[in-house]
Amino acid sequence: MVRNFRLLIFAVLLVCFAFSLNSTPCVAQTSKADALPSGSEVWQLLQAGLDLYRQGEFEAALVNAKKAAALEPQNYRPHLLAGLANDGLLRSKSASQEYALAILLAPQEKELYLFKAKADVARGATEEALAACRKALEIDPNYAEAYAEMGETLIGIDKRKAEAIAAFQTAIKLNPGYLGSYESLAQIFASAKDEKTAEKVYRQCIAADPRRMCGRFALGRMLLEQGRLAEARELWEGRTSDDERGRPMFIEVLKRAENVKLASQQLAAHPDDPERLVAMGFAVLEGDSWVVDGRQEKALTYFTKALKLKPDHARAQYGIIKAHIEAGDTTKKEKKELDLELARLRKLDPALADELTEYRKSYTGGLIGIPVDRNQ
């Protein structure tokens, strides 16, 4: 998600933490006694620890946090830094415990409850996360971010989608400029196949964003799924930025869809033209290595037909081989068949055969991940 609501609120709270390190209170309730002289050892440890955190040096940041906590046991900031560091290390249970300690020391700091809520969600403690959000709302009933976090906590629970919708709608009502809630709300409607409502929310998101980027690419992707390519292209042309966290990027998906449409139109006019069959095959074959959607098998039908119509068509033979490579043909029999196909291509075009020989060695068609235990 740009959208990434969690990253957005996390960044906002991190800035708040940075201010607090410089003795600038994040909320009105911060006590004067809690302020740290900028030259104190604890302040220096926390400032250095925050810098380490930003650099991804989470273990080192944790060391600084523990030293600071030992020097100032009544200061909540070392525990906040420790929670951030544990979050970075994917130790969600430890992060939650550190945030809980920070809350005990500074119960009126409403931001701390949301940090704890995020850590609780990451470790699967849904009710604890919701309880933390409710505590934040006791401090500030108009705290839009707390409602938004409640929505994010509930969004993955089918039986509680209505609660998530209500939470996001309240967050938007309280703060129309809180953009992350629009995108999450739209995604709920889109996943429920209520695309009309999802589109309405996405367009509200675009209108609420001064940069007119919130939800733009997400809406564009949804329009592509509906076959509304011209409207999706309008969204791309109306952008104010190319920045996008999602992969593949919207423009890539848009171009692929446009290429398939054009190739389809040209093939419909000349269904037995080998060149148009090959063009259609390559348009269909285009995609991301980690996506398994049967496009290789579909592309093979076009390449195979082209080769039957024109047996010496090198590009058709090239397409057949490339599709097999991307489909992950790895059994002994499949490898042997691929070797034979490459031999046929070499007779037609040695340069193309050499290209695919190297492609075969380097192509990786999937992602390998290591499960993370966040309950630590």
Image (cartoon, rainbow, N blue to C red):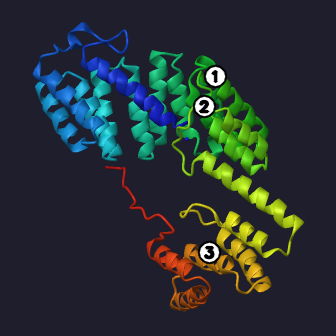
> Against 219, is 291 above or below?
below
Q: Viewer-proximal residue, 10 or 333?
A: 333
Whether residue 288 is situated above or below residue 124 in the rendered picture: below
Instruction: Answer few, some or many: residues within 10 Å of disc 3's Cα (few below 14, many 20 plus, some between 14 and 19).
Output: many
Would you say residue 294 is visible in this rendering? Answer: no
Q: Are marks 1 and 3 in contact (CB under 8 Å)?
A: no
Q: Judge the density around disc 1: few (<14), some (14-19), many (≥20) Cα neighbours within 10 Å.
A: some
Q: CA distance from mark 2 to mark 3?
A: 36 Å
Label 2 near label 1: C-beta < 8 Å? yes
Residue found farthest to the right: 269
Which one is earlier in the sequence, the residue at label 1 or at label 2?
1
Q: Secondary structure at mark 1?
A: helix
Among the two numbered marks 2 and 3 on one chain, the one whose residue lies closer to the N terminus = 2
The amino acid sitting under disc 3 is: Ala
Of circles 1 and 3, the one toward us is: 3
Q: Which residue is found at the position 63% from the left and 33% from the top?
A: 239
**Nearest to the observer: residue 25 or residue 141:** 25
Residue receiving disc 1? 208
